[in-house]
Image (cartoon, rainbow, N blue to C red):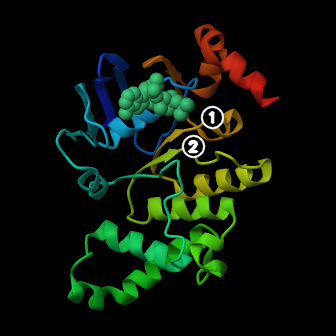
Amino acid sequence: MSTPALELIGLKKSFGKAEIIRGIDLSIGKAERHAIIGPNGAGKSTLFNLITARFAPTSGSVKLHGENLAGLEPYQINRKGLSRSFQITNIFANMTVFENVRCALLWSQGYKYSFWNLVNRQRELTEGAEAILDEINLLGRRNLPAGTLSYAEQRALEIGITIAGGADVIMLDEPTAGMSNTETDYIMDLIMRVTAGKTLVMVEHDMGVVFGLADRISVLVYGEILATGAPADVRADAKVQEAYLGAALEAEH
Ligand SMILES: Nc1ncnc2c1ncn2[C@@H]1O[C@H](COP(=O)(O)OP(=O)(O)OP(=O)(O)O)[C@@H](O)[C@H]1O
């Protein structure tokens, strides 16, 4: 079997005496779209922050393409090919849409402080930023201050920023939160396109998005994975129905 894109091994996290992540083992394959779902407070954001090294685990480990990430800083993990979005919009409102993407490209390539690299790479950066803007349907908005975009467009821009460095593992935290049905469809389509051939790990509350996008789903309840599997299997799982999905699916209608 080929090395998984992401592997969580015996992962635990406590805050003080409270054990929030209580021993998670999970393998996510290359090019798999994986959704993490579960009730409020189950530990989804904490798990996300453990994978991306914003939090250090209390015990256990995270491997990216077989490499243990222990001790690495978030930016180092980013350069190894894992990129995440944030629940809170993470764009520079006064900079143009184009500059936001260009900045993300620069940052991801580590040219931040090198003047000569900047000079030599101008064209490459401009073309790279334009290609991303095209992918996220924002080429026509390139010269607008990012803060003037609609909410859904800002979330699309954020996805553009997340994919800018060419990472092959993309983590999205509630990408459709607060959106109308039309906006949700728009972002779902965009996610499908920009993550084609990449590994996607997504925390999402909207069951339409989860069941529409994911190849596999993990249900997190009280810091543990209750079930992992294909959408149809997870949907049919009696434990999942009881603990979460029955209520979550009802809430959709
Ligand atoms: N830095 C922290 N310090 C102490 N407790 C924390 C910290 N971060 C999260 N928690 C606690 O961990 C538990 C899980 O929180 P988390 O945000 O990971 O859940 P979640 O599944 O993402 O919830 P939601 O769906 O509401 O976003 C909660 O009880 C929360 O209060």
Query: Which quadrant of the rendered structure holds the N terminus?
Result: top left
> Is residue 142 depicted above or below 157 in this figure?
below
Q: Quadrant of the C terminus?
A: top right
Residue 120, picture quadrant: bottom left
Q: Amino acid at mark 1?
A: His
* Ligand 1 location (quadrant): top left
| Distance (Cα) linking label 1 and label 2 | 7 Å
Q: Position of residue 73 (x, y in %)?
A: 23, 49
- Above or below for 191 versus 70: below
Q: In the shown orientation, is residue 158 left or right of residue 118?
A: right
Q: Cβ–Cβ below 8 Å for labels 1 and 2?
A: yes
Residue at (53%, 61%) from the top-left corner? 158
Q: Is residue 62 left or right of residue 95?
A: left
- Which residue position holds label 2? 174
Residue located at (46% from left, 35% from top):
45
Front in this rendered view, residue 202 or 178: 178
User: Is 145 rendered above or below residue 13?
Assistant: below
Q: Amino acid at mark 2?
A: Glu
Q: Is residue 36 visible?
A: no
Residue placed most toward the observer, 67 or 93: 93
The kind of secondary structure element at disc 2 is loop
Q: Is residue 129 left or right of 80 when viewed as pictured?
A: right
Q: Residues within 10 Å of mark 1 (few under 14, many from 20)?
A: many
Residue 252 placed where, x, y %?
A: 77, 30
Q: Residue at x 29, y 70 (%)?
A: 109
Residue 205's disc is 1
> Within 8 Å of ligand 1, the CB of disc 2?
yes
